Image: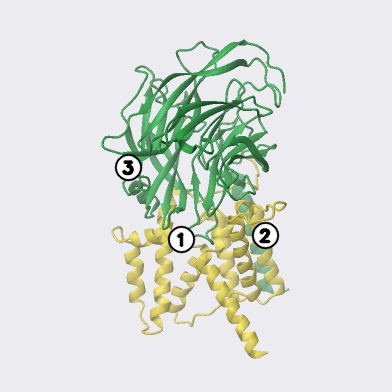
Chain colours: A yellow, B green
Amino acid sequence: MNGLNFNHAVLPYAAVLPLWVKLSWALVMSAVVLRLTYGFKPTVWPAAVVAVVMLLPRTDVLSGYLALAFQTPSLVLVAWALWCWADVLQMREPVATTPTPVAVVGVLLGWTLVLDTLNYWPSWFNPQLYALGFESAGLWLVLACVAAALLWTYVPKRWLLSALAVLAAYVWLRLPTGNVWDALLDPFVWLALHVQLWRAWRATSASA
Amino acid sequence: MKTPTRLGLILLVAVALCDAGLRWSSTAQPMPQAAVPNVTTDEGQEDAPICTDYRVVREGLIPMPEGVPAAHASSLVAFPSAHPLHAQKALAAFWFAGTRESGADVQIASATFDRQTQAWDAPQWVVNRHTVGHDLGIQIRRIGNPVAWADASGRLHLFVVATGLGGWAASRVVHLTEQAPMQFKVVRTLPLTALVPAFNTSTLVRTVPLPLSDGSAVLPLYFEIGIKYGVAVRLNAQGEMQRITRITQRREVLQPTLVAHSSTHWSAFMRDYSPIEMVAHSETFDAGQHWQDAGNLSLSNPGASIAALRLSTGDVMLAHNPAGRGREVLLLSTSPNQPLTWTTRTLMDGVKADEYSYPTLIEVPSTAQAHNAPPDVWLSYTHMRRAIAFKQLRPQCAANVPRSKP
């Protein structure tokens, strides 16, 4: 039966997933190499070679091993990788754009997902947070947070563009898993948000 | 309000509307109820025969692939009438086999039971880690624990555990579907835990799904990394994952096995990993939307997998090992549907170091019986970690007498 049901999961099209694993990890790893090497020598060749090696049929085991440990990167990490490439190709300096309140929410969301995965809730409280990410309610919660950030904090245009692109890609393709939390957070994004908060805290402490 | 902010808010609303539109076009099913045989009232039954005992009419070992010394974790599925092999084969068994559990050469083996010869056919390999890894684009270290299910159209699905970096502590559940009779192709890895704590999170499958009235099912799974708890994944009639629900707040129970007492009242019985060593119990009264812990059954459990089945006769059957003696003894307990009061008999009684474990129970209608006779119960289990054994149990029933309600 077809009908408007906001609770069921809509998963990504299965046939695109192997391609997504390769493509996403190739983009992310090449962006990492780009960021690490470009400071020493302004050339894109090492990063381009990494991307090609990770996409070629015989050498794509690298993405396979990354997927073995981390499954797939989030859409946010892929967006970061695309911005890395865009910055270098357009000869712009990389910039951090995530507003601090958004970083706080991201870090808290990550810790809450860890608690949820480990089932460390009191017996009277069972939020099933990860399951919520498959429902429309999870997406609405994210949209409300982005709207709140738009209304009450300074939001760089690039961040807004990225947020809208990530959410639109999630809604359209349901990548990477069909769960909105997985589209936003992975271990690397979560770690980066911790680092950003730590730096913000240190900067505040130094200026105080 | 600035123009970019206004534009941003409009686009956010557009994203929400797109989500609603895409959900409108995707298949959404109402909450189906459990497929419970002969139910005429919510908890009771009428016209169900009274079956006092189950006699073993056939038993033995399922043939193993040649030269393979180890086998474990079997699953059974009856071929539905819509399946192309239904006329020739009654049921299929799946298990993992290789040189040892978690060995690099472990593959998923299967064998079918032929209706005409009344014997198991030669086994065949159906899945290995290389084909799974190739189809997923992921390097898979090990595979195991196959679970089979037939969807509404009669197509078989296979759910297998595939381990990542970290071995069994980093397991994922891979979903495969039948492309041709007994030929399987990978669909996807089921998304069961968040990517954030990705490293070494582990979700596994072990027991058969609970069939629902519309041909969909609830697949029991469990999370295991130090702490252990059961979850239930709702599959639609085509086998697509619909939602995931945690079925217990406890953190030392795993491998849930589901039975439906009525269309909406279900139980999950779980292997206990705590010092209590009793079969753990969770219940839902709203067809799996909400679960609550219901303590323990009166049956002991030495941290070993169990199998439960709601029988066509109305009773509930549980295959399990007892605490104290462990996996060297395999017991079969039956209880009226509600309240649960168990009668236990011994199926296998070995000596120390023997192992009769990881049972699976299903019902398969027998062609040798009268038209209205209850189906036979088929039990498979690990035999000494060297092979998979089976027993065909036939209910010994009195004439159909209306059963009093509990």
Q: Quadrant of the C terminus of chain A?
A: bottom right
Query: Residue at coordinates 58% horizontally, 16% vertically from top-left?
Result: B51
The subunit carrying tag 2 is: A
Q: Position of residue B68 (x, y in %)?
A: 29, 38
**Which mark identifies residue A141?**
2
Corner quadrant of residue A91: bottom left
Q: CA distance from mark 2 to mark 1?
A: 25 Å
Q: Position of residue A33 (x, y in %)?
A: 39, 74
| Horizontal side of residue A111 vs B78, given as left or right | right
Which amino acid does the dot numbered 2 rest on?
Answer: Leu
Q: Position of residue B323 (x, y in %)?
A: 54, 38
| Horizontal side of residue B93 vs B375, given as left or right | left
Residue identifier under label 1: A70
**How many residues crowd mark 2 within 10 Å: few (<14), some (14–19), many (20+)?**
few
Question: Depth check: B190 or B344 in front?
Answer: B344
| Horizontal side of residue A13 vs B133, given as left or right | right
Question: Depth check: B209 or A17 in front?
Answer: B209
Which amino acid does the dot numbered 3 rest on?
Answer: Gly
Q: Is residue B406 visible?
A: yes
Q: Secondary structure at mark 1?
A: helix
Q: Quadrant of the N terminus of chain A?
A: top right
Q: Is residue B149 visible?
A: no
Q: Secondary structure at mark 3?
A: strand
Which amino acid does the dot numbered 1 rest on?
Answer: Phe
Query: Residue at coordinates 36% horizontally, 67% vertically from top-left?
Result: A51
